[in-house]
Image (spheres, coloured by chain):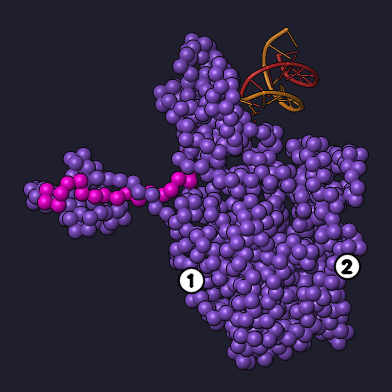
Chain colours: A purple, B orange, C red
Amino acid sequence: MPDNATAQVIINIPTRKIDKPFSYVIPAHLSAITIGWRVLVPFGNRRVEGFVVGLEIESTQGLKPILEALDNYPWFDNNMLATAKWLSEYYLCSLAEAMRLFIPGQSGIKIQKSYQTPAELDWEHAAILLSKKPAEYRTILTYIYEHGPVTLNNLTKLSSQINPIIKFFLQHKLIITANSINKRGQAASLTVINLAVSREVAADTEKALPKNNTAQRRLLQALLHTQELTTVELRRLAIAPNTVKKMADQGLVTVRNVPVFRNSYAGLNRQAANLSLTAEQLQVLQELIPAIRNERYSSFLLHGVTGSGKTQVYIQAVAEARRLNKQAIVLVPEIALTSQIIARFQAAFDNDIVVIHSKLSVGERYDAWRRLQTGQAGIVIGARSALFAPVNQLGLIIIDEEHEFTYKQEEAPRYHAREVALARAKFAAATVILGSATPSIETYFQALQGRHKLLSMKKRVDDAPMPSVTVVDMRQELAQGRRSVISLPLQDMLTETLAKKEQAIILLNRRGYSTFVLCRECGHVLTCRHCDISLVYHAPSKILRCHYCQEKQAVPDVCPECGSRYIKYFGTGTQKVEEALKGLFPLAKIIRMDQDTTSRKMAHAKILSAFAAGSYDILLGTQMVAKGHDISNVTAVGIISADTALNLPDFRAAEKTFALLTQAAGRAGRGSKTGRVVMQTYNPEHYAIIAGAEHNYSKFYQNEIGFRQQLCYPPYTSLIKITVQSDNELTVHRQASQLAAELTQKLSIADTAIIGPFPASVNKIKDIFRVNILIKTQNLAAITKEIYSMNIVSRNNVIVDIDPVNVL
DNA sequence: TATCTGACGCTC
DNA sequence: AGCGTCAGATAT
């Protein structure tokens, strides 16, 4: 057999067991296929989506042909492919898992399972088999025979117990599966109607119409008037689709489907761009602009204090990339909390922007991706998934608030957007800007080492002063007999703020502070039956809920442990703080922003805009009140419990606390008025609190980096977290010990330590027990390679997390 | 001894 | 991931 053109295809099935390309013949009519195309291929006895990653001329002996091309252009360009490959190697996932990140909805096809009778069905044999079964069986088989391929959904209507029947039919080969494949996420289309004849002919036809044929007359008149009509206009003119069809059949009009691009963010109100730049902004741009023009890989850490105008720098940098006809990716930590940044970008770039967020349908996402792919848009802004947008002219990637932990994906593939961005930028020869007021220790360390160029902005826009911070030692408050969650200095500050008709934000650092339920007699805390975690009391619905598995439970009257009736709701939830505030300031209008009040779509934005409009005096909430907004009338920020996160056994506790305090304090005094901050704490001497109060990043960094070095934590080492899971507590411990022993034996690489196994901090979630093993290493690449060769990743009860954000 | 359930392995 | 094969367990 002569050699022929073949394609190496990665099968889009997210399992690590088939992590290699398969060869397929490229049929003559699909000769346009090259690397990067999405194709439909036969795989076993089914048809699946695949990605072409290589071309060869080889013997086609035993190879099947590609069935179809799913698009008529390559979806992946070289840098996307290289990024996917890098991601799969670094994070130990299959190439398919990495590549499908680039596909809207993870797959371009949807398989609809259906059933039909085989052509050679032996009815006599069937009759014998069915004679032992209820009459229903015969009815259903006849139905399948008569109606051709039938979906399971259709069959459910025929019998309430369809599953065992289907199973029986399949087993005895009375039916076979016949999967139909639908392409997903195709562009939405619009039906457009035009005249198919000249205006004169149309006018004559219209005159000749019978008097009572008003629908056709209306249509012709409308077309003579406006050239073309859409379905929306047809509905308005009360013209039935039938009328249109009839006229199309007569050759009077043409009906076409034209793709349209949905724009679900169109309604968002826009904010005018501030065109004057501060001296620091100009200085920073003098570094950035040549780098962008250079069209080579470069990376910057933009360390700018809160209110220093980082967004304006981003906009200028993106504008420069656009002038060079390069495209830009802008990442924000959470789209719901960053509507202000999006509004500013939209004001500056209008239709050149595509906004990606998790609420988009697959179709909308597909449209957005297509606008970028075709160059109709040049900028994509979104959460970490925007990183995988098919921009072929990538020139710039911006990561706003680069220290945010939401950039780490907590499901497989467990990638960190910052690392992937740097990799993609390298492959695309693009510039990266990492921006933050509180850079992550790792990034700052790398910047000091020269891996990123460090740019600083130390002043706020218009020389506005940093807010003055008062640290309140809550132990002294208690010693003076004050037991309220609101300290005297905080109360005073709020009184003054309200008197001046200015606004305040109160942050409740909720970690470890949830409202659990405790028996005062025996100390028993009510916990979830399926998860090793205390249940949370929800005041509005008066029920207990587990935040891990969402199970709801009524509050018991007596303690399930000792039978006592003294059950009490504990903890300082936002609701409790709200009550305290209402007691102190009965006239103040308070709005709460927490999980209870923001469950609805865009609730964050609504609450924030109502607060910004001055409808409320005090905004009270958890972490989310500290981020991404800029309200000029906010002059006071109160932090109820600055230190709760400090007590967690997490090596990043201080970093998280410092970042949160700085971000929260940064909300005060964004306008012309000076801001004030009160931080309440039981740890006033902790360096994270002191540095936070002084707005002193470098003081915090110096302290923290010392600890990291002492304890061999990142950035001095890399971490790998291996989690073993099982529904059996004994099994999970046994397997974890075995794995730890195996690792200790195999990983005899220098500067590597294996810690554990130890039970995860939430030992059980949804009835699954979890045990962790932590690897600290200075040689990540070698260890990763070794773990890969040990085949640990393909075990389905083991999770390997490279650079985990959460080590507990 | 016939049937069922679960581990293993293959898919170009 | 499916889906088929094979082997061991279980009902008959």
Specify whether residue A140 is in view: no
A192 in magenta: yes
Residue at 15%, 49% in the rendered image:
A198
Q: Dot 2 corresponds to which residue?
A: A706
Chain of the residue displaying label 1? A
Helix, strand or loop for disc 1: helix
Q: Is residue A202 above or below residue A653?
A: above
Point out residue A711 in the picture as x, y percentages from the top left corner. Answer: 90, 61
**Circle 1 Cα neighbour tier, 10 Å, few/some/many (<14 / 14–19 / ≥20):** some
Specify whether residue A6 is in view: yes
Residue at 11%, 48% in the rendered image:
A201
Q: Dot 1 corresponds to which residue?
A: A347
In this picture, which residue range is highlighted in magenta? A183-201
A735 in magenta: no
**For the N terminus of chain A, which image quadrant?**
top right
Residue at 87%, 78% in the rendered image:
A685
Point out residue A192 in the picture as x, y percentages from the top left corner. Answer: 29, 50
- Mark positioned earlier in the residue sequence (2 or 1): 1
Q: Is residue A148 left or right of residue A78?
A: left
